[in-house]
Amino acid sequence: MNTYRRFLLKLSGELLSGEKGFGIDWETLDWITEEIKETLNLGCQIGIVIGGGNFIRGIDSATHGIERKRADYMGMIATYLNAIAIEDFLEKKGVESKIYGSLGLRNALDTYDSKEVLSFLKEGRVTIFAGGTGNPYFSTDTAAVLKASELKANAVFKATKVDGVFDKDPAIHKDAKFLNQISYLDAIKMRLRVIDLTALSLAMELCIPIVVFNMKVRGNLKKVAMGEPIGTIIRDWEAV
């Protein structure tokens, strides 16, 4: 029996770009959606919050002179492109899914309704959330924590290109130590680049565990869902 019955999977846009570094790599999207399908077959209930960094990142655009609020809305709109692509690939694999958006786009997706989403999840379907929180200055990481709270999910799974959390940047420091578990407060003090600080603070307040893991390793999503020691778990360990 899987440990995490219901979870929010936070997928970055960068993951969907594969080795291309921009846009959507269709082969990568194909195997990611296959991993989601296989994990769903374990009996999990899966919600997906998708980023848009493979097209544009609001905070990066702001550094190039675009007003921050406009830049963030550009980033939110980019998430819709990824959401539609994920929905299409899932449905071609026989997985029923539906997109809910925080910004109006009535012809392509539905307006978020927590009761409807819960019913949808319990039926074994996948829900995809686009547009982040719908507000500038907040990341899609924060959106994932918010949705996890609203849907009473067991955890947020933060899918990345790295194995988890290290005590320092492993790309720079060869002696970087991998951490299989860490508290919210320690993660905040370390100012981890792998997850947004606002999301961490909110997760701590709402007591929602975050599992940071390497999505590029085939089978990892299923292993994390089944409670295997993959990646790094961020939670209040003193309360365990």
Image: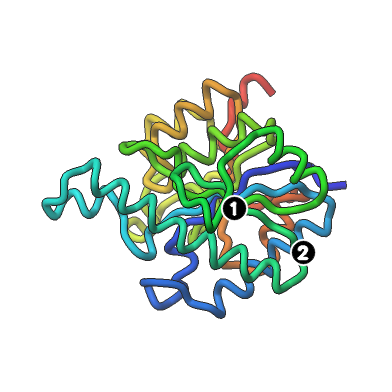
Label 2 CA crowd tier, 10 Å (few <14, some 14–19, many 20+): some
Q: Quadrant of residue 236?
A: top right
* Figure check: 9 above or below 87: above
Q: Residue at x 65, y 34 (%)?
A: 114
Does residue 166 appear in this view? no
Residue lying at 21% horizontally and 43% vertically, measured from the top left: 68
Q: Residue at x 75, y 63 (%)?
A: 95
Residue 190 in percent (x, y) is at 37, 36
Disc 2 from disc 1: Cα separation? 20 Å
Type of amino acid under label 1:
Ile
Give residue 38's mark. Answer: 2
Amino acid type of the residue that numbered disc 2 sits on in the rendered structure:
Glu
- Crowding near pointer 1: few (<14 within 10 Å), some, many (20+)? many
- The residue labelled by disc 1 is 99
Closer to the camera, 224 or 114? 114
Q: Is residue 106 left or right of residue 197?
A: right
